[in-house]
Amino acid sequence: MAQKTYAWISLWFLLTAPLMIWDAGYCLMRPRSMVGGDLHWFWKPYELYGMVDYVYGVKAFEDGDGFASAAAILNLLETFANIGYLVGTHMYETRAAPLVGYTGATMTLAKTILYSTQEYFCNGCAVGHNSPFNLFAFWIFPNIMWIVFPGSIMWRLGGDMMIAIERGSEKYKTR
């Protein structure tokens, strides 16, 4: 029996993989990717984002704050899992694909919650300086997306895996 595929999950993983690699590249290539660096042209939008979220800014880098770079490593691992889901679902049709996709979505959700709650517990130390509009447009809204979509993917793929486990259990009982 062929496993279910969901266009919206594949589309999310397909669209976010390059974005996550780009983000990880910015963090791991600092200071060359930052304002004044020879590679800054490729990451020009981070000039604005570094002013919105100090975690991505020059000061955090100069202070040795390693959170952005540590999160970048997780971005790469998540992306690897998400691409693994796409390959496992659309090229090889492996039964492990839903578990791989679930794992990638779980990592994304957990990292986003960690990132958001860290900001809460430090009393807005990295984004609290923003106007309400900038805070919503550039930080809250994007983080909501990184919570809603991975959470929905976990719900969908987790539900499918539970059904498969239950069916397998029923087959085992009838032997």
Image (cartoon, rainbow, N blue to C red):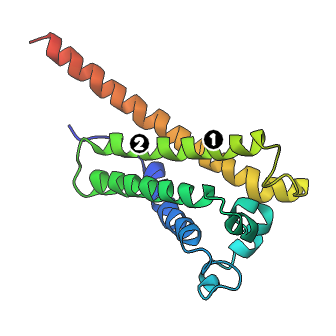
Instruction: Please tell me how crowded label 1 is: few (under 14), some (14-19), or many (20+) other residues with Cα within 10 Å.
Output: some
Please report the residue visible at 42 percent of the width from the left and 55 percent of the height from the top: 77
Task: Residue 58: give its label.
Answer: none
Outermost residue, front side: 63
Q: Identity of the amino acid at label 1?
A: Ile
What secondary structure is marked by label 1?
A: helix
Q: Nearer the viewer, residue 4 or 58?
A: 58
Name the residue carrying label 1: 113
Quadrant where the image shows the N terminus: top left
Q: Nearer the viewer, residue 114 or 150?
A: 114
Name the residue carrying label 2: 103
What secondary structure is marked by label 2?
A: helix
Q: Position of residue 43 (x, y in %)?
A: 63, 77
Q: Identity of the amino acid at label 2?
A: Thr
* Up/down of 159 relative to 11, above or below: above
Contact between labelled residues 1 and 2, with CB atoms less than 8 Å apart: no
Residue 136 horizontal side relative to residue 58, left or right: right
Please report the residue visible at 34 percent of the width from the left and 31 percent of the height from the top: 161
Quadrant where the image shows the C terminus: top left
Q: Nearer the viewer, residue 26 or 10?
A: 26
Outermost residue, left side: 175
Please report the residue visible at 52 percent of the width from the left and 47 percent of the height from the top: 108
Q: Position of residue 76 (x, y in %)?
A: 45, 59
Q: Quadrant of residue 14?
A: bottom left
- In three-dimensional space, the C-alpha distance between marks 2 and 1, rounded to whole angstroms, equals 15 Å
First in sequence: mark 2 or mark 1?
Answer: 2
Please report the residue visible at 59 percent of the width from the left and 85 percent of the height from the top: 39
